[in-house]
Image (cartoon, coloured by chain):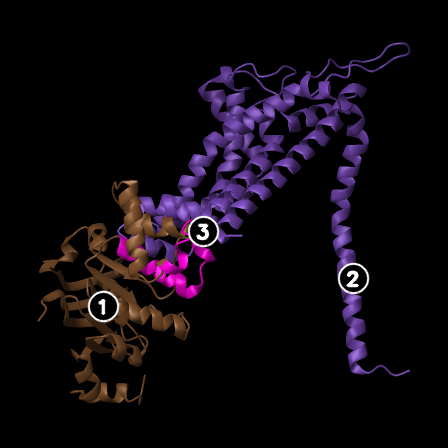
Chain colours: A brown, B purple
Amino acid sequence: MNGTKMRVERLSAYYGKTKAISEISVGFPERKVSAIIGPSGCGKSTLIRCLNRMHETLPRTRVEGQILLDGEDILELDPVHVRRRVGMVFQKPNPFVTMSIYDNVSVALRFNGRHSREDTDKAVVRSLQQAALWEEVKDRVDAPALSLSGGQQQRLCIARALAAEPEVLLMDEPCSALDPVATAKIEGLVNELKNSYTVIIVTHNMQQAGRVADYTAFLYLGKLVEVGATADLFERPKERLTEQYITGRFG
Amino acid sequence: MKFDRSARRKLWSHTMTVLAGLCALVALIPLGSVIYQAVLLGGPVLSLSFLTSNPPLPCTPSVGTSCAVGGIGSAIQGTLVLVGLAAAISVPIGLAAAIFAVEYRGRFLGLAISFTADVLTGVPSIIAGVFIYAYFVIYDPSIVFSALTGSLALSVIMVPIVTRTCEEALRTVPHSLREAALALGIPKWRTTLQIVLMTALPAVLTGILLSVMRASGEAAPLLFTAFGSRLGFQGFNNPINALPLLIYNFAESPYKNWIDLAWGAALILIILILIASVLSRLVVGRMVRRMRGG
């Protein structure tokens, strides 16, 4: 049984006066994949963006409650250091357009501390391998990042996040801009990644949650409705609302 | 004969296309005639010594004598000095203001910067000259007419242009890139300088060049500041010549050789701006292609 890597306690997040999520308490087990599902606007993206303090980068936002990483409240820490421990992959691939593939993957190493060229090279290869992109780009790591396809760009973004050696990897609907083939690759990747990382993934696709997640949390209107092992949640939901959502009666 | 609807539409479409083409031609007439006139009257005086020697004393040829043609060397040198110093002053200020307004939107202050820059862009350029003139008359009259005050007057014109164009350039950088950098634990200042600014660099350079070209063509702000001089650069605290200033002073003179010189200077100014514009397009185009991997 794994311990809890991250836990939020009575977490509320605001955009101006609008309360996007309300008093959510949930734990994310170490080296497991946890999915957050729910209809559009339920606050799942807001929740995951709180976990590496990206929520507060938007104007007029506010967070209340506690977010514990290994028992330490990250709201008390320097956000820059939090983000080095909690990496993130976004909905749309967002590689740095001025940089090559190599420079994209190594950016965290190059900007956030001194590493020898040799260490950086190794980290780039390792990260690209972990992101299942190495075989496709090993002959052209100096090519511009934008020369890659959309699916490849998203795996590049995953490699870039992994190169920073985070403890937790947040994925905010990482496949929503990708075709089914690329989606399948990313999902396979997520299954691999949980051997070394704690993965938290937001998805509006319930089949995807079913395929990749060990645990699933269902959010509705900013509140946590139900959380549990994925199979239990999908097959024997405790709440009526959950059942209605997973059977497609709303959302 | 009876028109069906489709034939009528086609006729209408052709008519309007021809009309739009004519309008485009009409719009090109002023530009074409300016260049034609400058080449016609300025072309004959061009030579290597025209680019290097200083303007001659005024002279109208009488029977049996001829006037020295001279050149515009001091004006070319002066324009380079004035615009160079003005750019050195205004680019850091304008760029920093733009970065502050876009990246550190302190709400009110950011809006205030954009608004002020907008207003300043619309201020007639002669005001910039009078402003610097008035300030130095009170503060240090000995250098009222100097390369320094000329550059400062040009900076007053360049700063708002650099600010506005750089603001627009920085705003075109997608928010997702800033998020990507911040989420990697890259500090804000580094994200701004090494991700956002580098991504916007082609557009930022275009904006800076735009302000340089605008300043190169300005005569009004230099009338009471750089003042003009027949000689070349004499130090930053002495008057200095500039191409537009020379054109303004000489074109209205009654002396044949000065008028010729003014036309030659006009042609050189057009050519210099054309070269700068083409070069910058090439450089920026190459930067963009390198990003896209072409």
Label 3 chain ID? A
SS for tag 1? strand
Q: Looking at the image, is A24 positioned above or below residue A251?
A: above
Going by the numbered disc 3, the residue's amino acid type is Ala
Taking the image as shown, residue B212 lies to the left or right of residue B251, namely left
Circle on res. B19: 2
Left or right, residue B131 beside residue B189: right
> Who is closer to the viewer here, B54 or B199?
B199
x and y percentages locating residue A227 in the rendered image: 16, 78
Q: Is disc 3 placed on a helix, strand or loop? A: loop
The mark closer to the camera, 3 or 1, is: 3
Q: Nearer the viewer, residue A218 or B232?
A: A218
In this view, the residue farthest toward the top is B64
The Cα atoms of the two marked residues, 2 and 3, are separated by 47 Å
Q: Are marks 2 and 3 in contact (CB under 8 Å)?
A: no
Instruction: Using the rendered image of the protein, determine whether residue A53 is visible from the camera's viewpoint.
Output: no
Q: Which mark is residue A143?
A: 3
Q: Is residue A157 magenta?
A: yes
- Circle 2 packing at 10 Å, graded few (<14), some (14-19), many (20+), is few
Marker disc for residue A200: 1
| Predominant SS of the magenta segment | helix
A54 displayed left or right of B133: left
Three-letter code for the amino acid on which mark 2 is drawn? Leu
